[in-house]
Image: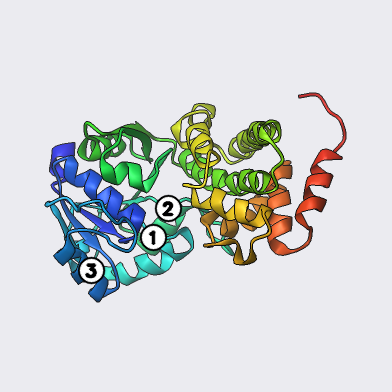
Amino acid sequence: MSGSSFRRIGVMGAGAWGTALANAAARAGREVVLWGRDAGAMADMASARENRADLPGIALDPAVSPVSDLDLIAECDAVLLVVPAQACREALGHLGSRVPAGLPVICCAKGIERGTRAFMSEVIAEALPGARPAVLSGPSFATDVAAGLPTAVTLAAGDGALAKDLAQALGSSTLRLYHSTDVRGAEIGGAAKNVLAIAAGIVAGRRLGASAAAALVARGFAELMRFGAAYGARPETITGLSGLGDLILTTSGPQSRNFAFGRALGAGEAGAGKLAEGAFTASVLVEMAAAKGVDVPVSAAVDAVLAGRLGIDGAIEALMARPQRAE
């Protein structure tokens, strides 16, 4: 199937990121079905031609049709799965027998499933055995993509021809997609960087300075490389858009939900804002690292803080007191 064969794209999940990707697919010349479970919210979106709750002020492309009927998603040529990582299995279960064999399902969530330690492509394969899993990951803020600002990301699938065709179908003059067969590398980069972004936010919230922030990102990237190697990721993927690129973006400021969550924690703000994907991923990432004997001190510190085993000051002290070693 060539890129031009993907005429109709389904987007499952109508939050900020799902709406942004719907606009991006429409700019690529596709008909887009944007699904959300709240019928009232989808009716409002269809009427207002705007996602007023999540992306106010950004018009919905005329080629995007907001719906609440899952049957319309199952009739599409490919589906972008844009729900939180921990909700992916449940969302796919609702599709069930509606999905035709061979349907490409592209996960756009960044995380690892708790309890099962399954990567998102594995969740797709288990929940929809007939589907063809793929992953979209890379440095991309929803507001930038929705507004048509220049963005480049990675689309990975085990079948190289499928990855190339999907990238061709979804790419446009404002969204550049690099295709890859390293599904695991793309998944690891997207999941691990969220945990590291919480750490970067904590550093900012504690006002520890730019030097500490730079050291945190550099050492965090080193552990991302170690974790990726242990789980079969290619080095060029981890140093590319879905690894280093996404890490740079998501540790750069409060537009990142994970960074904002960490900054609120570091500043001691009650509730610490909206819970982010990295908060769910931290514990399972640390468990998986331990299973492979991989040292991930920054991620482990984030996990310890979130679990209440360490205070923030104690976690910082523990990191700084680690034995001197060669870089």
**Mark 1 near mark 3, Cβ–Cβ under 8 Å?**
no
Circle 3 crowding by C-alpha within 10 Å: few under 14, some 14–19, many from 20: many
Residue that badge 1 annotates: 83
Q: Residue at x 39, y 57 (%)?
A: 124
**Residue at position x 53%, y 57% from top?**
276
User: Are discs 2 and 3 less than 8 Å apart at CB?
Assistant: no
Q: Quadrant of residue 317?
A: top right
Distance between the Cα atoms at labels 2 and 3? 21 Å
Q: 272 or 121: which is nearer to us? A: 272
- Quarter of the figure that contains the C terminus: top right
Task: Determine whether 142 is above or below 162 in the image.
Answer: below
Answer whether labels 1 and 2 touch (C-beta < 8 Å): yes
Residue type, label 2: Ala
Image quarter in which the N terminus is found = top left
Give neighbour class at mark 1: few <14, some 14-19, many 20+ (Cα, 10 Å): many
Q: Which residue is mark 3?
A: 42
Query: SS class of the residue under badge 2?
Result: loop
The answer to which of 243 and 55 lies nearer the viewer is 55
**Residue furthest to the top:** 326
Camera-near label (1 vs 3) is 3
Distance (Cα) linking label 1 and label 3: 15 Å
Of labels 1 and 3, earlier in sequence is 3
Measured as percent of width and height from the top left, residue 67 is found at 19, 67
Labels 2, 3: front one: 3
| Nearest to N terminus: mark 1 or mark 2 | 1
Q: Amino acid at mark 3?
A: Met
Question: Which residue position holds label 2?
Answer: 109
